[in-house]
Image (cartoon, rainbow, N blue to C red):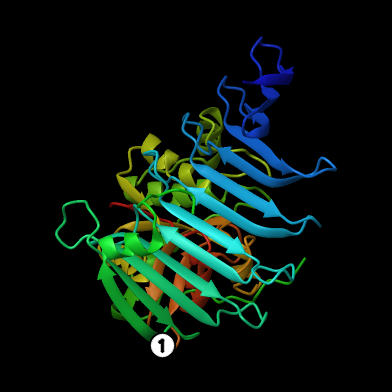
């Protein structure tokens, strides 16, 4: 039974924009943030103690305003309101099943996360891998992974049913320490569970710029040509707009004013034009669709897939953690704050110095972002922070 507490109509159109109510799940707040008449964010608080403090929080969001919830967040706190568990889940293809779940846990009670687990279901990168789970543990509190534990649910015969589960443990460098495999039925018997996809101010670095005279045979893509389309976004949240602009103009040969792109994106609810606004990850391809650019968006990718796309003459847009690229922030995999907050176009991979391969970016967020050079390992860490999202735009 739902008990309404309060209803708000902020724009006076006779349609509720926010409501608070109790139900069997706890105290809920539902919001229509873009005023289109559909709830696009629901917060739920539960696990109240004797003082009325909730110790469990959940939120679900429709980040691309298409009527389907695609991002889910949950957190648990202890008696002292320290967060002991935090999780995020995404339904990238919006088929009703989670594609990626990431969970952080404080197993020692010292107030910091020491375990991070990432599970992928629909975007595993393998035809025989139905799901894979990667866990890393920090035993000594130095914010570095001391051990890794990995599992894959495998479908060898391609009938859509799991056949086997492979378990692997790794050392801090990622080397395999132990590997075992068992039939899926035995795995279920041991775990007594059903197979399910349930919710399991700084100084910027002095980055170099690509030299157009670099030997082309050592470079994937055509950075020199793409650099001619670069523009600086200034103090705005328009990074994904510019990244799409670069790709659209390169593929169509049409020059499109940035204000036209911003107006289209704002009108359709794909973008909030403010320094603190921007574009959600699932809206990073909407302008490509609008201007008829054939493309494919995916998550959980590998560097080889970016390189293949560039070698095929295609354009690539990705989401990254800007702090790691611009300021040399540490790649803290045990922090939920290490996430993608910026979109860039990858225009090349420069291997002219084999010992120091560089990823070449058209980065609208930096005044020196035309052909920006980022060490490959730094880029990979910054890219992984956004679950290795990649949009390939076909030339």
Look at the picture and state if 61 lies above or below 328. Answer: above
Residue extending farthest right:
51
Nearer to me, 354 or 334: 334
Nearer to me, 77 or 369: 77
Q: Secondary structure at mark 1?
A: loop
Look at the picture and state if 261 lies above or below 214. Answer: above
Residue occupying image coordinates x 33% and y 69%: 307
- Could you tell me how many numbered marks the image carries? 1
Q: Which residue is mark 1?
A: 353
Residue extending farthest bottom:
355
Q: Residues within 10 Å of mark 1 (few under 14, many from 20)?
A: few
Q: Is residue 190 left or right of residue 109?
A: left
Q: Is residue 198 visible?
A: yes
Q: Is residue 352 visible?
A: no
Look at the picture and state if 335 lies above or below 284. Answer: below
In percent of width and height, residue 257 lies at 51, 40
In percent of width and height, residue 271 lies at 56, 38
Residue occupying image coordinates x 85% and y 43%: 51
Residue occupying image coordinates x 61% and y 38%: 272
Q: Quadrant of the N terminus?
A: top right
Nearer to me, 73 or 305: 73
Residue occupying image coordinates x 65% and y 75%: 205
In percent of width and height, residue 264 lies at 50, 32
- Picture quadrant of residue 169: bottom left
Look at the picture and state if 14 lies above or below 107. Answer: above
In percent of width and height, residue 238 lies at 58, 47
Q: Is residue 323 left or right of residue 94?
A: right
- Picture quadrant of residue 326: bottom right
């Amino acid at each position: 039974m739902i008990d309404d507490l309060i209803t708000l109509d902020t724009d006076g159109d006779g349609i509720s924009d926010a409501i608070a109510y109790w139900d069997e799940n706890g105290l809920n707040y539902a919001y229509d943030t873009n005023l289109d008449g559909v709830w696009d964010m629901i917060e739920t608080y539960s696990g109240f103690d004797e003082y009325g403090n909730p110790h469990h929080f959940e939120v679900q969001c429709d980040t691309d305003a298409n009527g389907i919830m695609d991002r889910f967040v949950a957190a648990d706190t202890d008696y002292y309101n320290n967060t002991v568990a935090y999780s995020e889940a995404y339904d990238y293809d919006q088929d009703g099943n989670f594609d990626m779940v990431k969970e952080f846990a404080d197993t020692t009670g010292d107030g910091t996360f020491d375990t991070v687990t990432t599970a992928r279901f629909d975007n595993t990168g393998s035809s025989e891998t139905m799901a894979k789970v990667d866990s890393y543990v920090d035993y000594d509190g130095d914010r570095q992974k001391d051990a890794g534990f990995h599992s894959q649910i495998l479908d060898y015969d391609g009938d859509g049913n799991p056949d086997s589960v492979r378990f692997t443990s790794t050392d801090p460098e990622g080397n395999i320490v132990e590997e075992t495999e068992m039939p899926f039925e035995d795995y279920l018997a041991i775990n007594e569970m059903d197979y399910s996809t349930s919710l399991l101010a700084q100084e910027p670095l002095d980055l170099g710029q690509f030299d157009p005279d670099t030997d082309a045979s050592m470079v994937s893509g055509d950075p020199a040509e793409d650099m001619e389309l670069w523009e600086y976004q200034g103090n705005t949240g328009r990074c994904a707009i510019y990244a799409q602009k670069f790709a659209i103009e390169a593929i169509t040969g049409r020059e499109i004013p940035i204000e036209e792109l911003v107006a289209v994106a704002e009108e359709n609810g794909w973008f909030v034009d403010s320094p603190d606004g921007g574009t959600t990850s699932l809206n990073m391809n909407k302008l490509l669709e609008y201007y008829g650019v054939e493309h494919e968006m995916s998550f959980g990718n590998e560097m080889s897939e970016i390189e293949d796309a560039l070698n095929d003459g295609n354009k690539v847009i990705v989401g990254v953690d800007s702090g790691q690229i611009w300021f040399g922030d540490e790649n803290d995999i045990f922090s939920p704050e290490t996430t993608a907050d910026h979109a860039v176009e990858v225009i090349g991979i420069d291997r002219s110095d084999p010992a120091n391969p560089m990823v070449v970016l058209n980065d609208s967020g930096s005044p020196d972002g035309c052909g920006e050079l980022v060490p490959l390992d730094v880029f990979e860490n910054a890219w992984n922070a956004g679950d290795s999202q990649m949009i390939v735009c076909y030339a």
